[in-house]
Amino acid sequence: MGETPQEAVLIGTASISIAVFVLAGLRRMLGLSAAWIGLIVSAAFLASYFLVYQKVPPFPPVGAVNKIFYISLAGALMGLAVDLADRPRLTAWAVVLQPLAAALYIGQSRLTAAPLEVVLAAAAGMLSMTFLRRDFGGSAGEDGAKRMLLLAIASVGFAPIALLGASSSSLRLCLMFAAALLAIVVWNLGSEDNPFETPAFLGGAGGMLSVIFAVTLITRKADLLALAILALVFLVPEVARRIRWIVGLRSPFARLCAFGLLCVIPAASGAAVAIISHGSGFPI
């Protein structure tokens, strides 16, 4: 797919974005429940994975990279089942505990040599998911769109950190998934449907956290300072709720744009730290 890595990224990103855009549009025109949008988010992550690695990994998976696919797939199916069963308490537990399970599963080989690293990664993942699930202060549709925008910007911000962490494949996966999320957001503008139901948390956000776990725990070359700065993006909803001029904006689209600009600050700062710390030899 493409003669150069850059062409492969462009073709893959365009393909995923168009496919997801069409699916999200059909979902809205057919009036299907919002739970299916979350499933589209998970499908976008899995499709991005497939285009990057050109395969469905064998089962049972061996190695952190192969485990990422099945963590996302299991999360998507579990999330859909929980939403269809309408069990909000179970949703809350699943969203918080999934990062713990993913960190232990991916970092299994590190549990003996560096258990504290795995524990810290799990704690950071659980905290990130907790903040992502908190009330953003708007309607269900607006909050869902903000969650999707936050995850897209965080994915783009992690891309250069992943490249610095010796994972060019993760960079491509991050960019493709981010573009797909933005394509879904377009269809959610003006809609009160929540596009970020449980499958999006467990299959989409959970999949991205698994990528981060793989880069930080297995390759162990990620810039931790850059990653810590990037993680501040999950605090943006709390900050945005306290900025009066953002809250006072009448247009939901304007509020979404302002929220996105706030998210860009920690994401761009984290990416900049990664690039600067690597010096002139950063592979672009």
Image: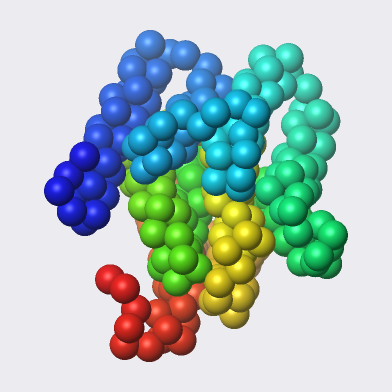
On-image quarter of the C terminus: bottom left
Q: Quadrant of residue 268?
A: bottom left
Question: Which residue is depicted at the point 35% across and 23% down?
Answer: 23
Say above or below: 283 vs 29: below
Say above or below: 35 vs 234: above
Residue 15 can be seen in this image: yes
In the visual, does 67 lie left or right of 20?
right
Residue 197 can be seen in this image: no
On-image quarter of the N terminus: top left
Question: Which residue is depicted at the point 81% across and 57% down?
Answer: 111
Q: Quadrant of residue 190?
A: top left
Q: Judge by depth and name the residue closer to the eye, 280 or 274.
A: 280
> x, y percentage for residue 113?
81, 65
Q: How is the image coloured?
A: rainbow
> x, y percentage for residue 221?
56, 72
Q: Quadrant of residue 216?
A: bottom right
> x, y percentage for residue 259?
47, 60
Q: Judge by depth and name the residue closer to the eye, 281 or 175.
A: 281
Residue at the outermost left position:
3
Question: Which residue is depicted at the point 46% across and 78% down?
Answer: 274
> x, y percentage for residue 227?
57, 71
Say above or below: 267 vs 51: below
In the visual, does 212 lie left or right of 101?
left
In the visual, does 214 lie left or right of 180?
right
